[in-house]
Amino acid sequence: MSLNDMGWTPAHEFYFTELARPLWCPCRVARVARVDRGRALVLTSAGEQPATWRSTLTLMDTTPIDTPATGDWCAASRHAGLVCIEMILPRASCIARGMSRGERAVQVLAANVDVAFLVTGLDGDFSVRRIERYLVLIRSSGVRPVIILNKSDLCADAQARTDAVRRIATGVTVLMLSALGDEVADVLDQELRYGQTAVFLGSSGVGKSTLINRLLGSQSQATAPVRANDDCGRHTTTCRELLVLPGGRSVIDTPGLRAVGLMGDDDGLDAVFSDIATVAADCHFPDCRHEGEHGCAVLQALATGGILQDRLESYLRLRRESESAALREDVYWHRRHERRTAGHHRQQLRECYRLKGR
């Protein structure tokens, strides 16, 4: 396979030339296909190769990161037959979710993605509110979302549920299909062009791996039936993996997400709830909370039927979560700055004592 087939662009070529030049060893271009338990699998023009990374791995030559993410472009070297990731190139896009544990826990789901296929089943696991949450996550990353409503053959009111999704997903392509149908590959081919990368997101059991198998033309990804009593899926995909499709396109398969935490970005929230954001611009107070303030245009629209109650409640709930995530982010960076400053002062004090002979 060629680098262009995997999504290599002139922008990546520029960053690789500029950032890899000062490295102490010669490097080659690679793309991270899988990360699992401290080891990675990278794709090069020579094929798949196992790789590891240094403890001082950096992003954009300045920002330290713990581990590379699936989809990352990197500069890799070879030592004693082992491929080592030296540096991560700047990410064109990054889909990440916030986690509830710790003071700041962020999980990168996929990097350098062009299209995000949000897959949900039209069976008993269907939820409009969950789709809204996923859309906020995708919009915050700057990636184009495409909603896939799978299992249309198992739902009696599939068209009604599709219409409900289209009402809350303004400007987003919504596809209703069955992963077992013959038209799946043709429909998805129209949304994924040469050199682009798509990530499949959704809960367990919605059919992500089945759709990817249809694109690959083989049973490459493991699948399993959902539970009969509640239509909940089982975790068959255990790690995020990048696969190169025939024709120079790439897809990233991801495990089902039990929780989708937001990252504190208001742009994605306003893009998904554009109807509420437009009305909120007419509120009397610019920082209106829409919870009983005088002159609130949103509450007036709610009273006249311009905004639905459940959609407003979903918006307020996601906004509170986004603000809480932003606050945790600010506290984290403030504490990190304090720790670095205190460490610098201690180092200077030790150097002063050393010069004085203490």
Image (cartoon, rainbow, N blue to C red):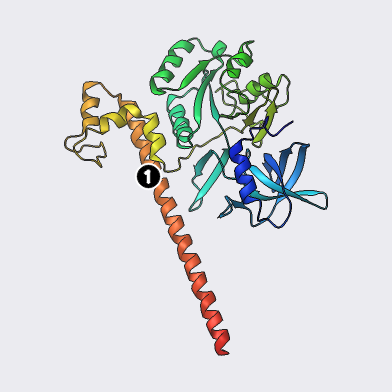
Q: Is residue 133 visible?
A: yes
Quadrant that contains the C terminus: bottom right
Examine the image and state in which quarter residue 210 appears: top right
Residue 266 or residue 247, whichever sits in front = 247
Position above or below: 345 against 167: below
**Which residue occupies 56% across, 11% down?**
153
Direction right: furthest residue: 80
Residue at 79 percent across and 49 percent down: it is 82
Above or below for 269 versus 220: below
Q: Residues within 10 Å of mark 1 (few under 14, many from 20)?
A: some
Q: Which residue type does callout 1 highlight?
A: Glu
Foreground: 10 or 210? 10
* Number of numbered discs: 1
The N terminus sits in image quarter: top right
With 70 as the anchor, is 332 left or right in this view?
left
Residue 304 screen position, x and y as percent? 21, 22
For the point 48% across and 12% down, the residue is 158
Q: Is residue 125 visible?
A: no
Give the image location of residue 333, x and y in percent: 45, 56
> Relative to residue 53, is residue 164 drawn left or right?
left
| Disc 1: which residue | 323
| Residue located at (40% from left, 41% from top) | 321
How far from the left and from the top, in percent, is residue 178?
A: 58, 14
| Circle 1: element type | helix
296, 24: nearer the viewer? 24
Q: Nearer the viewer, residue 194 or 289?
A: 194
Extreme residue toward the left, this view: 294
Residue 297: percent from left, percent from top: 21, 31
